[in-house]
Image (tube, rainbow, N blue to C red):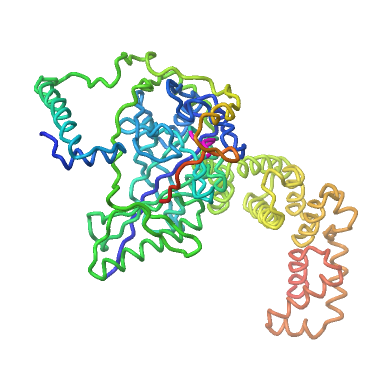
């Protein structure tokens, strides 16, 4: 099902993207082409095929590698904060957010 | 028309690991802002998460403890939303395939045990902290907490009302501490609950529209918040209105809940499997190893205490409220059994209960915890054995316990020094009884005329004459024998 202009605006809002109505039309055309491609793929019979979310086989022993629970990182906040726009008393400052 | 209150609880238990779930930064509480936030935690470009094995082990321990299904394959997903204390723009969580599915927990509701089923438990990372005090009109962000491992535990909506919800939260709090996966410190935010509350007409099968109350960080607030929220919903429905599904915050100062996020921003987290993390695959050997290392669980221990030690239920319940209390009791009870090999079990349990009540009261007064009691389990058992073998009366035992608490020595030393032994020597008591009978002909006459109460006065006289050291039961028996014989 093709996306409507309203749906494009909603998706843009969720992704915090400013998309003007004109840009929205171009984005809509592109996204609808992607959805068409997906529709084509959905036409393939996949009964009995395991959904694949990762490109690596997950046979026993082949899953996520785990690390030991050890503190290996040191305090580098001065370096990290050197490139932050605003910092005070060790805190990153951001425009006021109130729930 | 009566209403039924329906509650489901989501608990965030901070897992007791040294390092974060996806980075090697420390998780210690109270560090200076951002000093424990690594490149991964602040989401610098190009970093990748690496899963902490200890966090996975905590989840498995929990799954075993609640009898849930430990999924041999679970998947991490991205939960997308924008907030400055979430630098990646998504939280790594689990969605379609959580590490633990199902399970249940048993809780005491009044005299009854209620089994509450769990929906799931999944691993996720915590967000940072926003400080809204005034920084020149800006908000301060501390990312030390970002990436701290959490186990989110979701109950089925099977709790009926605020009191049951609190009983559930307490039972869950006790369990996660018991199995050592969470320190349970609510002030520091290690154990937080959200409550999903709805109401329906008694007898209705369908659930009403629910509201979620966020971040309840004390049992008292949880009870107040749920009670308020249920009243609010009932008032709306009785006034002909409709409940809007929303997230609400509890304001303890005003004792009310209020709307937190507008409906327009209804949750749409656009979950998808995180391509940075492979599925978590668990093998049987690891699960078996963890199972073999599990401590005896509170419910099993409670039943064992009732069966093997013949303890009354309330007492077994109180002892198993925490692992520390239970371990302390087992040590104490072991000594007591050795010291009083052939004593009456019921008498033993009563005396043990007495000493525990005294210790409990002393702990409340002093603000200490069970592991800080200044009297060892052996010394407490010795004191109780002296009550059981009749050396001292209960009243004298109270005095001895107080002296032991302030470090005056062992029970026997204090009894000896203060001369608190009961007089159990039959000859000595017989002499006292004879004297009292001779001196109180009026009471003797009354008793013989059928006034049973007159005996109490005589017992009192003998006790007084013995300066409280005679064994009252012995005095009573002896008096009766003399008067009726």
- Name the residue located 24 percent from the left edge and 62 percent from the top edge: B242
- Name the residue located 64 percent from the left edge and 44 percent from the top edge: B329
Q: Position of residue A51 (x, y in %)?
A: 23, 22
Q: Position of residue B341 (x, y in %)?
A: 70, 42
Query: Is B326 in front, or is A1?
Result: A1
Query: Is B435 in front, or is A70?
Result: A70
Q: Is A57 placed above or below B93 here?
A: above
Q: Is B455 placed above or below B48 here?
A: below
Query: Is A25 in front, or is A34?
Result: A25
Q: Is residue B407 left or right of residue B86?
A: right
Q: Quadrant of residue B377?
A: top right
Q: Can residue B225 be seen at all in this image of the molecule? A: yes
Q: Is B60 placed above or below B240 here?
A: above
Q: Position of residue B275 (x, y in %)?
A: 34, 22
Query: Is A8 in front, or is B357?
Result: A8
Q: Is residue B227 left or right of residue B401?
A: left
Residue B145 highlighted magenta (yes or no): yes
Judged by its main secondary structure, the magenta piece is: loop
Magenta residues span: B142-146
Q: Quadrant of the C terminus of chain B?
A: bottom right
Q: Is residue B343 left or right of residue B76?
A: right
Residue closest to the far right:
B417
Residue B279 highlighted magenta (yes or no): no
Q: Position of residue B14 (x, y in %)?
A: 50, 38
Q: Quadrant of the N terminus of chain B?
A: bottom left
Q: Can residue B296 be seen at all in this image of the molecule? A: no
- Give the number of marks: 0
Q: Is B138 placed above or below B199 here?
A: above
Q: Is residue B362 left or right of residue B182?
A: right
């Amino acid at each position: 099902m093709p996306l409507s202009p309203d749906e494009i605006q909603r998706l843009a809002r969720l992704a915090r993207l400013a998309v003007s109505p004109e840009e929205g039309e171009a984005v809509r055309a592109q996204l609808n082409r992607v959805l068409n491609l997906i529709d084509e793929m959905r036409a393939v019979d996949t009964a009995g095929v395991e959904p694949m979310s990762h490109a690596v086989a997950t046979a026993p022993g082949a899953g996520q590698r785990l690390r030991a629970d050890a503190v290996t990182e040191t305090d580098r906040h001065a370096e990290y904060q050197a490139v932050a726009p605003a910092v005070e008393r060790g805190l990153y400052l951001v425009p006021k957010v109130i729930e | 028309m009566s209403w039924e209150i329906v509650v489901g609880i989501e608990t965030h238990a901070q897992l007791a690991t040294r390092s974060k779930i996806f980075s090697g930064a420390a998780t210690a509480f109270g560090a200076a802002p951002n000093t424990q936030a690594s490149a991964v935690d602040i989401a610098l470009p190009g970093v990748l998460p690496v899963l902490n094995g200890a966090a996975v082990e905590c989840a498995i321990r929990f799954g075993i403890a609640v009898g849930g299904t430990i999924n041999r394959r679970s998947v991490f997903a991205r939960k997308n939303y924008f907030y400055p204390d979430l630098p990646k723009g998504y939280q790594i969580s689990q969605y379609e395939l959580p590490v633990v599915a199902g399970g249940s927990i048993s809780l005491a509701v009044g005299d009854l045990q209620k089994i509450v089923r769990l929906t799931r438990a999944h691993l996720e990372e915590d967000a940072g902290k926003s400080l809204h005090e005034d920084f020149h009109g800006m908000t301060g962000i501390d990312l030390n907490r970002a990436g701290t491992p959490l186990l989110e535990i979701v109950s089925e909506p099977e709790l009926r009302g605020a009191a049951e919800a609190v009983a559930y939260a307490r039972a869950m709090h006790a369990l996660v501490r018991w199995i050592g996966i969470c320190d349970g410190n609510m002030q520091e935010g290690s154990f937080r609950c959200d409550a999903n509350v709805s109401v329906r007409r008694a007898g209705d099968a369908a659930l009403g529209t629910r509201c979620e109350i966020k971040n309840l960080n004390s049992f008292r607030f949880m009870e107040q918040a749920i009670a308020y929220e249920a009243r609010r919903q009932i008032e709306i429905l009785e006034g002909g209105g409709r409940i809007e599904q929303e997230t609400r915050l509890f304001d303890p100062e005003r004792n009310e809940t209020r709307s937190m996020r507008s409906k327009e921003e209804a949750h749409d987290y656009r979950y998808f499997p995180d391509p940075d993390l492979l599925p978590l695959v668990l093998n049987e050997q690891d699960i078996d190893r963890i199972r073999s290392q599990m401590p005896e669980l509170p419910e099993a221990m409670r039943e064992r205490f009732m069966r093997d030690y013949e303890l009354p239920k309330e007492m077994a319940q109180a002892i198993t409220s925490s692992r520390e209390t239970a371990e302390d009791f087992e040590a104490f009870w072991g000594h007591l059994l050795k010291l009083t090999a052939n004593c009456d079990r019921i008498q033993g349990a009563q005396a043990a209960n007495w000493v525990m009540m005294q210790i409990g009261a002393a702990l409340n007064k002093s603000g200490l915890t069970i592991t800080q009691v200044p009297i060892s389990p052996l010394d407490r058992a010795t004191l109780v054995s002296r009550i059981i073998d009749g050396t001292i009366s209960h009243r004298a035992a109270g005095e001895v316990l107080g002296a032991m608490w302030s470090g005056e020595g062992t029970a026997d030393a204090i009894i000896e020094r203060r001369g608190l032994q009961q007089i159990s020597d039959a000859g000595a008591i017989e002499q006292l009884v004879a004297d009292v009978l001779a001196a109180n002909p009026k009471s003797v006459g009354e008793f013989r005329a059928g006034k049973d109460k007159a005996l109490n006065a005589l017992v009192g006289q003998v006790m007084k004459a013995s300066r409280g050291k005679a064994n009252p039961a012995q005095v009573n028996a002896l008096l009766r024998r003399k008067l009726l014989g």
